[in-house]
Amino acid sequence: MSPASANPDAGRPPSGAGGGRRHSALARYVAKRLVIAVGLLFGMTLVTFCLTNLVPGDPVAAALGQRAADDPEIVARFRTEYGLDRSLPAQYLAYLGRLIRFDLGTSWQTHHAVAADLAKAVPATMEIAFGAIVGAALIGITFGAWSAYRRGLATDQVLRLVSLIGISLPTFWTAIVCFYVFYYRLGWAPGSGRLTPGVAAPPNVTGMYTVDALLAGEWRTFVDASAHLALPTLVLTLYTIGLLTRFSRTSILEVLDQDYVRAAKAKGLPGRVVFFRYVLRGAAVPVLTVVGLAFGSLLSGTVLVESVFGWPGLGSYAYQAASKLDLLAVMGVGLVVGLVYLCVNLAVDLAYGFIDPRVRVGR
């Protein structure tokens, strides 16, 4: 008898070798994603700087006013103070040096640090975006899955019509209609702003009033902040629900036509078991991508919604900075939005490696 036949474990890999390889592949995948993210971050700063400085118009005149801009001494002093008298490469290197120190410069409009202005504006927009993306993901993916499961039936037709209407309605028009109906006509919702006049803001921890009110135990403030949050969140949720419903339905239908799904059905597995165990998991990767992109677009596309509801968020700050040619503030907004997209995409990429092992092995 040969040694190999005498020892049945002689040809097997050591215990835990398979798990070690899986962990090693996952670690390489995560490291590669992080390196790519750093490169994208550098490219993002370059693109943001170049596009901002290519905007037509005179930022000096916009910042100082026409009368002060006609005084050469004032203009020279302003350009020297903000480094506008140097070449664009020198300005970009100075910009990178400030970014390393987490310094986004000083806004020409508010005369405050851009980082401080964004620290107030970003949480306000995040509060809307988080509520909208969570609600839209829960409802939209559920609608899409149900529509695909009931393909060709009346339920499918109704949900497809509802999602088409949600995508087709412009968000600014929906915002105006909701504000007119629920605030002006019915009085069910409060007016503009984040809090009713006379209600004090909660102690600042996250910048999101609902969260901070809960942390401080201020229930009256929490109820008031939630009421003000309802309408802008509803408007953004309606559009995103339509988008996620249609995309989820399409992704699930594509998975339903795969061979492994047919094989599972041929084995006699119940339809619901096949749908929830195989189909939904197979469709999770593309749906997760759209959820991430939708969240990023919510942060960058709230200008009109925030204007309608008087919400002091990132969109309102970006509009005011762009209208005044406040270059440092515009670059700060662009950097924050790009950074959010980068972080969301990185999180989605990392989630791919956990959801689908083929992704971390193949990349």
Image (tube, rainbow, N blue to C red):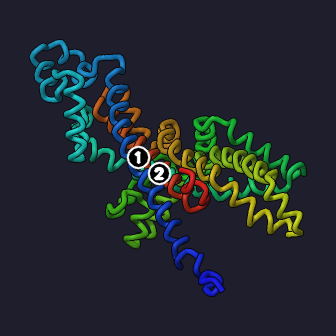
Q: Amino acid at mark 2?
A: Leu
260 relative to 308 in the view: left or right? right
117 or 330, which lies in front? 330
* Residue situated in front as seen by the camera: 335 or 171: 335
Which of the labelled discs sits on residue 37, or is there none? 1
Answer whether residue 206 is visible to the viewer in this image: yes
Question: Residue 86: percent from the left, percent from the top?
Answer: 16, 22
**Residue 228 can be seen, yes or no:** no
Observer-nearest of 314 and 229 = 314
In the rendering, which numbered label is found on residue 346? 2
Tell me which residue sits at (46%, 45%) in the image: 341
| CB contact under 8 Å: marks 1 and 2 | yes
166 vs 108: above or below: below
| Rendered view: 46 above or below 353 | above
Residue 86 vertical position relative to residue 165 in the rendered view, above or below:
above
Between residue 131 and residue 53, name the one nearer to us. 53
Question: Label 1 amino acid?
Answer: Ala
Instruction: Return the mark for residue 131.
Output: none
Residue density around tag 1, few if under 14, some if 14–19, many if 20 or more, within 10 Å: some
Percent position of residue 156, x then y: 84, 50
